[in-house]
């Protein structure tokens, strides 16, 4: 993961979210792990930053400790420090400015933590948490799911982990659908919005489109299966550029769009092949359970620290806002439960309903 000398701003969700950073990859940031110009630069409602520095010092004003976080009542900053190896410490300073969060992360924390290690989480997971919080404040929510579109009508797909949402989404591209996202959906009361998190590996696998640089494709596959391989990205600048260019070209060629009005929602379950139309109340309940358990806000140490030191943040209000967004979507959409035992059966059922 290359650290650059200069800071650059990237649009992650068109019109909604941008990130200024000096790194090229944030592997666990689900809105868009690759820092590249997939979308044109422009004004966005949220403007975050994630900057890696050699070292960070704790502001002396932050004199109250909550586990590994330091803060002060009414101060919009949170400082994190965790012992690692010997004298090496993992450090992070986060400042909230309105609905925007600005992250400073020291080199060891960014470089050495490749996955969750006990109580130590990757810093980009905290970045993701802050994004969820801010999107809720401006009337949007982020849920684990996929979104495709056909004839300017959006279809949301939800299911448990490993239920086949991504493979179903990309398989539908061969049937003439457009793609918005295959892993995380940004939702407003009416529309679903695209993110830059789509995988070129899946684009190739499910659309059969070849890339100009086959090495970079294999390289990407390794990157996702062996965490340490991610560091190789910084060693192959030309291959990385070709890789991203082919990704953008493939995304354009398969009809990636920025946003769509949602009118159908599908929830995947395992079982004998069946289509069941369900009520908006049942759909709301299932989506919340599958995608955003309310305990998320109470089990996250980073968010807990912000809530603790900033009593004006009303967590119950945030949860209600998210539920209202989902309720608005299910009330204006046809909601279905799809039961099947294979992705191909899900695809046939889903396509059958959409083409009625």
Image (tube, rainbow, N blue to C red):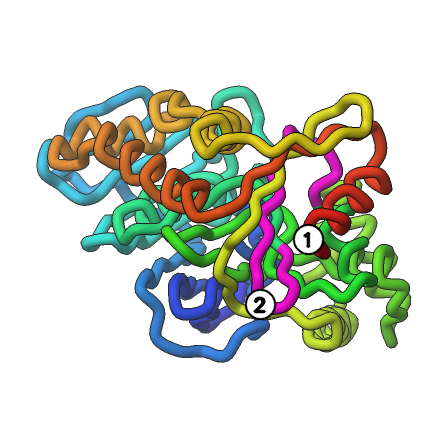
Estimate the x, y position of residue 1 in percent, counting from the top left.
62, 56
Estimate the x, y position of residue 340 in percent, counting from the top left.
79, 30
Q: Nearest the camera: 72 or 334?
A: 334
Of the residues under marks 1 and 2, which one precedes in the sequence? Answer: 2
Neighbourhood count class around disc 2 (C-alpha, 10 Å): few under 14, some 14–19, many 20 upward: some
Estimate the x, y position of residue 230 in percent, counting from the top left.
71, 51
Q: Is residue 145 visible?
A: yes
Please state the extent of the stretch shown in magenta in the rendering. 148-165
Left or right: 173 as drawn, with respect to 285? right
Say if 180 sits above or below 118 in the image.
below
Q: Is residue 161 magenta?
A: yes
Q: Secondary structure at mark 1?
A: helix
Left or right: 324 as drawn, with respect to 248? left
Q: Residue at 35% across / 35% down in the picture? A: 323
The residue under label 1 is 354
The residue under label 2 is 152
As drawn, which residue projects farthest toward the front? 356
Left or right: 164 as drawn, with respect to 190? right
């Amino acid at each position: 993961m290359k650290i650059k000398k200069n800071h650059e701003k990237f649009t992650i969700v068109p019109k909604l979210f941008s990130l200024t950073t000096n790194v090229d990859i944030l592997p666990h940031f689900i809105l868009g792990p690759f820092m590249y110009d997939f979308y044109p630069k422009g004004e966005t409602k949220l403007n975050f930053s994630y900057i890696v520095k050699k070292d960070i010092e704790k502001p002396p004003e932050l004199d109250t400790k909550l586990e590994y976080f330091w803060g002060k009542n009414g101060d919009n900053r949170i400082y994190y420090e965790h012992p690692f190896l010997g004298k090496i410490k993992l450090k992070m300073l986060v400042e909230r400015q309105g609905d925007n969060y600005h992250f400073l992360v020291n080199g060891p924390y960014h470089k050495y933590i490749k996955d969750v290690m006990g109580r130590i989480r990757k810093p980009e997971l905290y970045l993701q948490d802050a994004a969820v919080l801010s999107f809720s404040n401006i009337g949007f929510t982020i849920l684990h799911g996929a979104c495709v579109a056909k004839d300017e009508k959006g279809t949301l797909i939800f299911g448990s982990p490993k239920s086949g949402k991504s493979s179903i989404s990309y398989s539908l591209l061969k049937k003439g659908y457009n793609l918005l996202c295959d892993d995380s959906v940004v939702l407003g009361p009416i529309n679903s919005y695209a993110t830059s998190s789509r995988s070129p590996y899946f684009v190739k696998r499910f659309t059969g489109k070849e890339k100009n640089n086959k090495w970079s494709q294999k390289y990407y596959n390794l990157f996702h299966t062996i965490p340490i391989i991610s560091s190789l990205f910084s060693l192959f600048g030309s291959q990385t550029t070709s890789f991203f260019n082919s990704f953008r070209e493939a995304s354009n060629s398969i009809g990636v769009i920025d946003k769509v009005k949602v009118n159908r929602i599908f929830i995947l379950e395992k079982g004998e092949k069946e289509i069941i139309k369900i009520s908006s109340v049942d759909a709301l309940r299932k989506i919340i359970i599958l995608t955003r358990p309310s305990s998320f806000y109470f089990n996250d140490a980073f968010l807990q620290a912000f809530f603790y030191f900033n009593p004006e943040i009303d967590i119950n209000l945030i949860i209600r806002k998210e539920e209202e967004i989902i309720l608005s979507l299910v009330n204006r959409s046809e909601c279905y439960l799809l039961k099947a035992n294979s992705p191909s059966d899900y695809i046939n059922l889903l396509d059958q309903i959409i083409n009625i």
